[in-house]
């Protein structure tokens, strides 16, 4: 009993430390975003924006969310076929969770809701979500490598930092893909390897539970065993992010500047690579700082870039969060379900400790 209570308090302490770290990181990025900006002029551009352009922007964003849902359905069909219409609320709830909790807690919540509603194991669904994130990262790299040559003609500042981001991200995402691809293609070897570690380094009582968790995680990697499935996931990921970039393009028309779609592709890539960094809920700072810097590097006035990025961030955050709260309540869930989701994943870690 005392050990369980101690673990619970340790988990709570880690969450508070994580939240504090995220807030500090967001504060640093916000300082970078706002440093040198004339906030009065930023506010003038926000007040003068033609907000009617947000309507088609929000519309295409939800098309992107629908495509994300289909991509997840495509992966899950190899584990259990779940209709897109049933998955859509779960995906929206997860985005809401990412917007109100730090460290992408919405992804954990998504796996928990899927387990609650469809009885698909949390390790298997987490594996599919990790694959999504890897392919999202690869898509961002495609945007950088494709967009940068076409956008160089409008570059007003240094581009070295863009190249550095691309280089670091290339190593991380292609490295992660290589590891998971190897695990997926050699499942029996993977099971022997992690089985060897489990049998030699874990107490006897924990071996079978941990082996079961690892086996279910491997089930979630099944889509990587088929080149056709991998290409479909990559194609869908590119389509998702092109659709989301179209929202950036629509919102741009609300402000007094115009830049090429390739620059907006670069902005999409940079801000979404930056939001993989731990931050406060809703990617405060980690979205805004890189977004403003990218536009300024391509000759957009700082005040205009600041107003546009802040409005774009709000337009990405608010609609999906409101709809997520609606589905959250409709499913009869409460805020304690966030804790249950985190405890479920923490429980998996504790089994292995």
Image (spheres, helix red, strand yellow):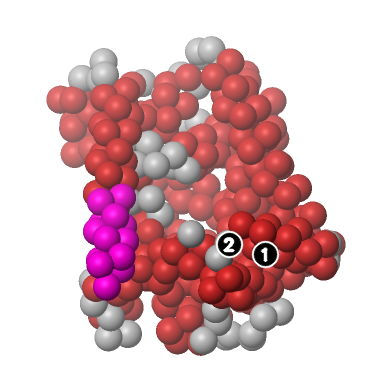
Secondary structure at numbered mark 2: loop
Tell me the residue at 42%/78% (across/down).
113
Q: Nearer the viewer, residue 125 or 166?
A: 125
- Relative image position of residue 118 (x, y in whole percent): 51, 87
Q: Is residue 162 left or right of residue 278?
A: right
Which quarter of the rendered picture does the N terminus lie within?
bottom left
Seen in the picture, residue 208 relative to 43 is either above or below; the reply is: below
Residue 82 falls in which quadrant of the image? Answer: bottom right
Q: Is residue 197 left or right of residue 50?
A: right
- Density class for disc 1 (Cα within 10 Å; few <14, some 14-19, many ≥20) is some
- Relative image position of residue 212 (x, y in whole percent): 62, 75
Q: Tell me which secondary structure the magenta stretch mostly adopts.
A: helix
Secondary structure at numbered mark 1: helix
- Relative image position of residue 92 (x, y in whole percent): 41, 69
Q: Nearer the viewer, residue 30 or 44?
A: 30
Tell me the residue at 57%/54% (across/down).
133
Tell me the residue at 60%/22% (across/down).
164
Q: Which residue is mark 1?
A: 199
In the image, the segment drawn in magenta is 1-14
Q: Which residue is mark 2?
A: 202
Residue 108 visible? The answer is no
Q: Are marks 1 and 2 in contact (CB under 8 Å)?
A: yes
Seen in the picture, residue 163 relative to 126 is either above or below; the reply is: above
- Relative image position of residue 155 (x, y in whole percent): 55, 18
Residue 347 visible? The answer is yes
Seen in the picture, residue 275 relative to 292 is either above or below; the reply is: below
Residue 95 falls in which quadrant of the image? Answer: bottom left
Does the magenta portion include 9? yes
Q: Nearer the viewer, residue 250 or 326?
A: 326
Residue 68 is labelled as none
What whole-number distance in Å separates the C-alpha atoms at marks 1 and 2?
6 Å
């Amino acid at each position: 009993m005392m050990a369980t209570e101690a673990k619970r308090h340790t988990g709570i302490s880690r969450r508070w430390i994580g939240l504090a770290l995220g807030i500090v990181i967001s504060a640093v990025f916000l300082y970078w975003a706002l440093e040198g900006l004339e906030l009065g002029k930023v506010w003038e551009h926000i007040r003068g924006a033609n907000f009617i352009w947000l309507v088609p922007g929000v519309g295409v964003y939800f098309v992107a969310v629908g495509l994300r849902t289909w991509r997840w359905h495509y992966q899950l069909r190899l584990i259990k076929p779940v209709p897109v219409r049933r998955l859509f609320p779960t995906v929206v709830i997860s985005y809401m969770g990412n917007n109100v909790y730090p460290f992408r807690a919405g992804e954990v919540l998504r796996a928990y809701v899927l387990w609650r509603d469809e009885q698909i194991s949390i390790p298997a669904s987490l594996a599919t979500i990790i694959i999504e994130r890897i392919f999202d990262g690869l898509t961002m790299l495609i945007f950088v490598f494709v967009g940068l040559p076409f956008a160089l003609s409008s570059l007003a500042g240094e581009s070295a930092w863009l190249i550095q981001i691309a280089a670091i991200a290339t190593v991380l995402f292609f490295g992660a893909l290589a590891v998971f691809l190897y695990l997926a293609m050699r499942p029996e070897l993977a099971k022997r390897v992690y089985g060897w570690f489990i049998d030699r380094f874990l107490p006897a009582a924990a071996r079978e539970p941990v082996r079961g968790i690892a086996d279910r995680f491997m089930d979630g990697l099944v889509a990587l065993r088929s080149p056709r499935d991998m290409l479909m996931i990559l194609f869908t990921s590119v389509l998702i992010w092109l659709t989301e970039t179209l929202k950036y393009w629509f919102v741009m028309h609300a402000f007094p500047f115009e830049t090429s779609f390739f620059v907006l592709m670069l902005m999409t890539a940079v801000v979404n690579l930056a939001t993989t960094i731990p931050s406060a809920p809703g990617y405060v700072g980690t979205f805004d700082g890189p977004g403003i810097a990218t536009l300024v590097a391509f000759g957009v006035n700082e005040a205009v870039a600041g107003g546009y990025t802040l409005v774009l961030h709000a337009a990405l955050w608010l609609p999906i969060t409101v709809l997520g709260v609606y589905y959250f309540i409709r499913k009869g869930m409460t805020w304690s379900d966030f804790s249950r989701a985190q405890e479920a994943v923490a429980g998996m870690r504790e089994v292995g400790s």
